[in-house]
Image (cartoon, coloured by chain):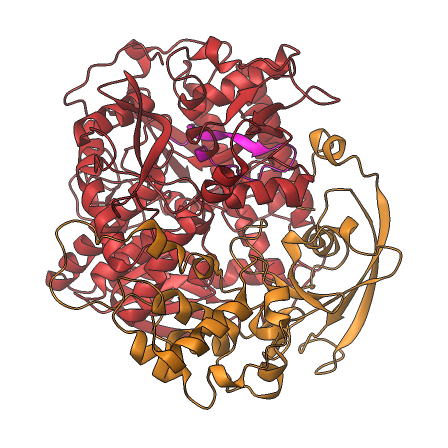
Chain colours: A red, B orange
Amino acid sequence: MQTHQYDVVIVGAGGAGMRAALESSTRARTAVISKLYPTRSHTGAAQGGMCAALANVEEDNWEWHTFDTVKGGDYLVDQDAAEVMAKEAIDAVLDLERMGLPFNRTPEGKIDQRRFGGHTRNHGEAAVRRSCYAADRTGHMILQTLYQNCVKNDVEFFNEFYVLDIILDKDLAHEDVPEGEPVSVAGVVAYDLATGEIHVFRAKSVILATGGAGKIFKTTSNAHTLTGDGMALALRRGLPLEDMEFFQFHPTGLAGLGILLSEAARGEGGILRNGDGERFMERYAPTIKDLAPRDIVARSMANEVREGRGAGPNKDYVLLDLTHLEPAHIDAKLPDITEFARTYLGIEPYTEPVPVYPTAHYAMGGVPTNITTEVLRNNTDVVRGLYAAGEVACVSVHGSNRLGTNSLLDINVFGKRAGVAAAEYAASAAFVDMPDDAAAGTIAELEAMRSRPDGERVADLRRELQESMDRGAQVFRTEASLTETLAVVKDLQKRYGRVSVQDKGRLFNTDLLEAVELGFLLDLAEVVVVGALERKESRGGHFREDYPDRDDANFMVHTMAYRRGDAAAADAAGIPPHEIRLEPKPVVVTRYQPMERKY
Amino acid sequence: MTATIEQTGPATSVGEVPTFEVTLRVRRFLPEGPRGDESYWDDHVLTMHGTDRVLDALHKIKWEQDGSLTFRRSCAHGICGSDAMRINGRNRLACKTLLKDLDIRKPITVEPIKGLPVIKDLVVDMEPFFASYREIMPFLVTSGNQPSAERIQSPEQRAVYDDTTKCILCAACTSSCPVFWTDGQYFGPAAIVNAHRFIFDSRDEAATQRLEILNDKEGVWRCRTTFNCTEACPRGIEITKAIAEVKRAMITRAF
């Protein structure tokens, strides 16, 4: 076992983690711990753009952007946070340009902007050109640019290190710590994939930037590595997770594969058609049609299929039609996604429409934070020294449905805020004592899975989980579908206690880590489903067929999910019984009262 | 099988390529295993589907037959650059190579990329690759005060270096280069591509320094123009052309 000491430890090296690192590394001794090489992070898969009211191509302002974000999130957005994001968006884009990001340009040489779903002029009048972009690889360029600047600033990375525990100075998972009582972070425990060695990092500040958890679903645009690690670690340590029932299903995944085709395809003029060739979005969102927010488009698509108007031999997808666009325009603006269609489906988008269907894309919920990115341990108290930014966090700027491009914005705005705040805190705070046996639990868990001679196979359990989540907790949900999925998840959690891995080695044991990741997925799936069962209304990405309307009287609140376990009462497999407790947290409303959401 | 491709609905109907059998012949190296430092071939016969990629076949082995098979992967659609491998003797991304596009009548060989130390099975030590990348100053260098708004760059100026911004640092190019195989000191195509990306960026002011770095005896002049790199690039970057542009800039200092 090795030990390290840093002022700031950042967990995750995607957009949020590296944006934070650029700030904190100039102010405090900083280490970035990443389970991947930084340039492998899933920020790189984002395509369409990053919105900011630069008004480079038409009139725009941050207040309109704030409104769109609030309305897009079906009013569950904390409006103070949305305002911060929309205001700071402009500098966030300019910061990236100054760092070297090769944005597409207007004829005058300024940053070009294009339309994107849910982003409108003057509170919904018409689509506005707000998204700053670099072809259809904006996320790739952001990830590369941030990594380039980390190289420039000599940021210290621990690559292919998996953080497997967060150490706090109080045991929130098993003890009641009264409101107002201070709780501080002491550091993290990490596993070095190459050697199998455990490393303990003592730190004054820890920033969680581990990204999303799309792998709880089967059909997803997310990377294999997006297993919700940071969220699950927080949950296990007794911290709440906020609004986990809200998951975004991106409308245009390649049918059957889930690979993302950017909303930019529709921003550039692409049209969705059903099996009859009808532009069906005209019926669901008469004003902005195909550029309605993602929850609405995804639901409309699923509804077309359900009502028998799907395309293809099984009528189980719809079509993204780009054939009316000039091939030169497609090549200039959408080169990557058209290549995906050619590579993976053998479809030529110049001449044939592309089969698409919704794909699990983004967790609106996550580790709750305030607008300074400090992690909350209840509705009001922060954990001292612990921060979170990006998809792992819930500020909440996305409410119940994130607008396209606002995730790249979120990681830049709140990543930067986290880096500054964590470094400033570290400048005045002292290190918290790290218990000598801080890594004991992690080591015991790893060894149990590694040494168990025979048992359940990780891949079997994971497939059953993902299939059950797609069946019961996807675009359409009901009491019955969720109840059934919850039973499956609970059963899989039991079976997880008997998981064994075939690779018994120490070096580069990805078999073992897939087992660890499955544990995270099972924890998070339970919270998603329990939250979805309890939210007996439909709002944004959460649609209950048995409660199809939004119910502001009862549910205009965030969900805070806590998990409490009883370690003393562990069952034969060593799994302590636990329960998920849900509590409400008020939504911050400043300028905009909830209205009916029409587009 | 990956979670995202198992659907039997649209995936199979779109491609309309039936199920088939294929043999995957994987180069194994398990230093902790019974065969120690010896590397060897391992054959697996698999039943696969029309839209399946080599990565799906590797996952099928790992998840259903042999959990010790080790490889890197993440995004599974050709953008993260984790899974560059030597497939049937050519460098490619496993997640972008459809099985049906290979000759499935013969065993498909999968080996680690060449020229970098193998750690385990298909996993190589990427550190020497990233070290070369870091040496060529892969970041924008400017002087003077930051402008209050964006720097102006015309669409034409941006187009000059567009191709080399696509690089995902997968090392398929560098590890396909015969010069790199025989001379571990050579910067390799990926580092030159990333130097090109900044040398030809109208906003950048450090082109001269980068060209001096690449004028080194292990720099661009070692390139023998075999075009392996261009053929290997999963992003379609015209690497040999970019290297030629860097060479020309070195002679003319016109950039």
- Residue depicted at 76% across the width and 79% down the height: B35
Q: Is residue A460 above or below residue A514?
A: above
Q: Measuring 26% from the left and 11% from the top, which residue is drawn there?
A: A595
- Please provide percent x and percent y for residue A449: 60, 57
Residue B130 screen position, x and y as percent: 45, 73
- Residue A435's quadrant in the figure? bottom left
Q: Find residue A29 and report its horizontal and vertical position in percent.
A: 22, 69
Toward the bottom, the furthest residue is B217
Quadrant location, the C terminus of chain A: top left
Q: Is residue A521 at least partly visible in the picture? A: no
Residue A259 position in % (x across, y down): 57, 40
* Closer to the camera in the image, B85 or A521: B85
Q: Residue at x 35, y 67 (%)?
A: B198
Tag count in the figure? 0
Is residue A408 rendered magenta in the image?
Answer: no
Bounds of the magenta segment: A242-264
